[in-house]
Structure formats: C-alpha cells, structure tokens
Image (spheres, grey):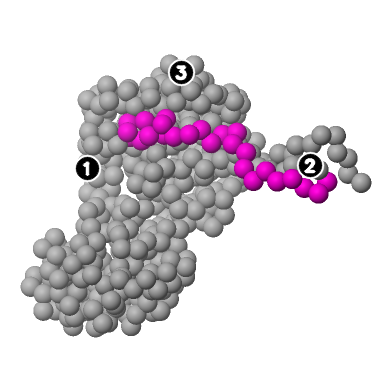
Amino acid sequence: MNTINVAEYTQTLGSQAKAASAHMAKAPAATKNKALKALARLLRENAAALQIDNARDLDRARAAGLPEPMVDRLQLSPKVLETCATGCEQLAAMPDIIGEIIGMKQQPSGIRVGQMRVPIGVFGMIYESRPNVTIEAASLSIKSGNACILRGGSEAIDSNKALARLVQQALAEAGLPQDAVQLVQTTDREAVGQLITMPQFVDVIIPRGGKGLIERISRDAKVPVIKHLDGNCHTYVDDPCDIAMAVKVADNAKTSKYSPCNASEGLLVARGVAAEFLPLIGAVYAAKGVEMRGCPDSLAILSHVSGAKLAAATEQDWSEEYLAPIISVKVVEGVDEAIAHINRYSSHHTDAILTTNHMNAQRFLREVDSASVMVNTSTRFADGFEFGLGAEIGISTDKFHARGPVGLEGLTSLKYVVLGEGEVRI
C-alpha cells in the first residue's frame, strides 16, 4: 500500500471500530461471554493449523537472523495456545463490570452521586513479537465492551492474521459486530503513524514492545498512551531471610524464562547474608550458563564458584534490561540501600524482597515505587493471568488510570451518575 492508501485504510478501520464500539458498549454479558467461549473452542480446534501459520513466521525470523529470545517470543506452542484458550474461559467466567455503580452517596441537597464503570470506547494496540497478544487484547476488548484495532509486528503477520480470523468468527457466532476487533493487515509502518494520530476514532493507544517503539509512540501520539518502557526488575535478598527459599526464588525469577519483561535483571543481596547466599545462587547460575555482572564485593565472593561466568558491572548494568542469561549482582548494606538502588535504577515494573523481617517487608512494599511490589515470591508472577485478571493487555508503569497488569478495569473508565427526585440547585 502506498502512503495515501494506508491513510485511507486506517481511517476506514477507525470509522468501523467507532461504529462497532457503540454495539459492544450495550452488548449483554451473556453475548460477550458466548463470543469468548467460542474463541476458546476455536483456538483448540484450530491448534494444528495455527502452528502451520506460526511456522512460517518462525522460519522467516530465523532466516533474518533474529536473536533466539526474540524467536522464542514468536512461538505459538500448544501450551501457549491452551493458555490463551483458558484465559478466554477465565474472562467469560468473571463478573461483567460494565454498568456497575460504585460509591453511591447521598448529598445534603438530596441528590445521590456515584460512579458507573463504562468501556473506554476504541483502543489501538501496537505490539511486537508475541502473537498471543492478539488473543489477549481481543478477549479483553470483548469482555470490557470495547472495540479495538490491533497492529502486530511484521515478524508475526501470518500468525496474527490467522488468530484474528478466529476472533472475528467467534464474534459473528455470538451475533456481535466483526469490526469490534480488527487487525491491521499491512506491515507498512505508516499504519502505526496513522493509528496513533486519529483521536476522532481512537480513545487510547497501548504499545507493547521494545523501548524504541514505545518511545516513538509516546512522542508522536495524539491520543493518550498507556505504556511501559522496559522491565528492569529486581530481587532483593534481605538480612534476615530463609536462604534456601531465597535461592529457589532468585533462580526462578531469573532463569524460568529469560525473555519476559518480568524476569529479574538485578539481584541485590544484603551484606549480612552475602557470604552464605551468593555461593549457592552463584552455583545455580553457573550451572545454567547465567553471566553475573557484579560489584567488587559480590565478585570477591563469586570468584570461588566453580564455572561461574563473571564480569565487573558498569554503571549501565544497573539500568539494563538484558532479556538474556545475564544478571547484575550488587551487595548492599540493607533494606535502605536496596530501596534507594531500586528507585534509582529500576524501570518501576516489578521488584521483590525475600525476607523474614516483617518490618522490612512492609517498608519495601510502601517505599519501592514500582507497579508491582512483592514479598517472598518470584517477579515472574507479575502477569495478568497469574494475578487472576483472566488476561492482560500489557503492564503499565504509568501512574495514572492503569498501573501494573492492565486487565478489564484498565480498559474501562468511570463516569459520574446522579440520581434525584426533582431537586434543584439553590
């Protein structure tokens, strides 16, 4: 498509989405749930065919020399597809929050004032790599009574087209407008530029991808943006702590999967437990080929670990999102220095403390300025599905409207409703 055609095409998508959003906003809960259950069924029925489409994307990605962590994000494995289907069913089983009225209070004038939860309207989703985001975004859009325009990465175009066809089939089965979920069919990057500058059609943009993409959208968008730039997450091992538990959790937080934004990229260790803890976790990381980029104090302890891959940490390492088998390691004096380090260097995504000191845990929860803050568990749990949201459309590190995993509530707004019996203002 040339530029003029792309502009016309995105305008058409916008206008269709706007019209569909009016139907979605008034759709009964049972109808929306019917579409979600149909989508779950179609994903399972078409699993083999979807993997054929996905294989074309994977072959192209490897031929183009895409790094293996990025190829991993493209996978539509049976497990990934089942998670998507289960997410749809979980959403269908959840209460419908649209139309819910909260905080109704009687005022001295006699009127009653509360707030009603309503759909945002139309959201645009721009994402890279993971094609399962197509299903997460579509299912959340359906349940929340919104319409959406999805623009996935060119590296996943075949997978996304196949998934979008199933979404529209499920909408049709339930008697909902197929235009409620539309996938941008062109890989022309101009489509992104058009989508983020259509406030007449699009109410919010949600980018999900690399830092460059999100910075560009935040800079150029003419509609509100819900975003997170990167996932530099930390695990802090406190003094005192359960050392065996800390080793297990710090291992999982880093090595269960290297590519997600909720994997720990920084390990902070209180000086009082460093001599006992670091050799143990160092041996685990060494066995799994994880490079440890440490401060002088941590390297002095880790240097005795057989087979450890060690390097001196630079200032940049404290801020780095590796998405790879690399972790920064720093010995800190205690919870004060850990909190200060996290608030300075983290991306305010997810940070965890491993401790047996209740006061330190409470301070960490209150003072760490991140979207998700955890005690005695893995940062890998920072996920809409794991939080019981059914699915997530992304993880927001913004501080307004939506923060953390963005599920149903993050795709809604509140409007004031006022109930009276003939009162007039004096």
Residue at 20% x, 62% y: name it.
248
For mark 3, does the 10 Å Cα neighbourhood hold few (<14), some (14 to 19), or many (20 or more) residues?
Answer: some
Q: Nearer the viewer, residue 344 or 36?
A: 36
The image position of residue 105, as x and y in percent, is 70, 46
Could you say whether the residue bearing mark 3 is in a helix, strand or loop?
loop
Q: Type of residue at label 2?
A: Ile
Relative to 29, say whether 426 is above or below. below
Residue 88 magenta-highlighted: yes
Q: Which mark is residue 62?
A: 1
Q: CA distance from mark 3 to mark 2?
A: 39 Å
The mark closer to the camera, 3 or 1, is 3
Could you say whether the residue bearing mark 2 is in a helix, strand or loop?
loop
Q: Type of residue at label 3?
A: Ala
For mark 2, does the 10 Å Cα neighbourhood hold few (<14), some (14 to 19), or many (20 or more) residues?
Answer: some
Residue 263 magenta-highlighted: no
Residue at the far left: name it. 306
Q: How many marks?
A: 3
Q: Which mark is residue 174?
A: 3
Q: Splitting the image into 4 quarters, where does residue 89 fall?
A: top left
Taking the image as shown, residue 307 lies to the left or right of residue 157, namely left
The mark that comes first in sequence, 3 or 2, is 2
In the image, the segment drawn in magenta is 84-109
Q: Splitting the image into 4 quarters, where does residue 133 fall?
A: top left
Relative to 202, say whether 209 is above or below. below
The image position of residue 25, as x and y in percent, is 58, 29
Taking the image as shown, residue 309 lies to the left or right of residue 154, namely left
Q: Type of residue at label 1?
A: Arg
The mark closer to the camera, 2 or 1, is 2
- According to the picture, the residue beneath numbered tag 2 turns out to be 111
Relative to 131, say whether 49 is above or below. above
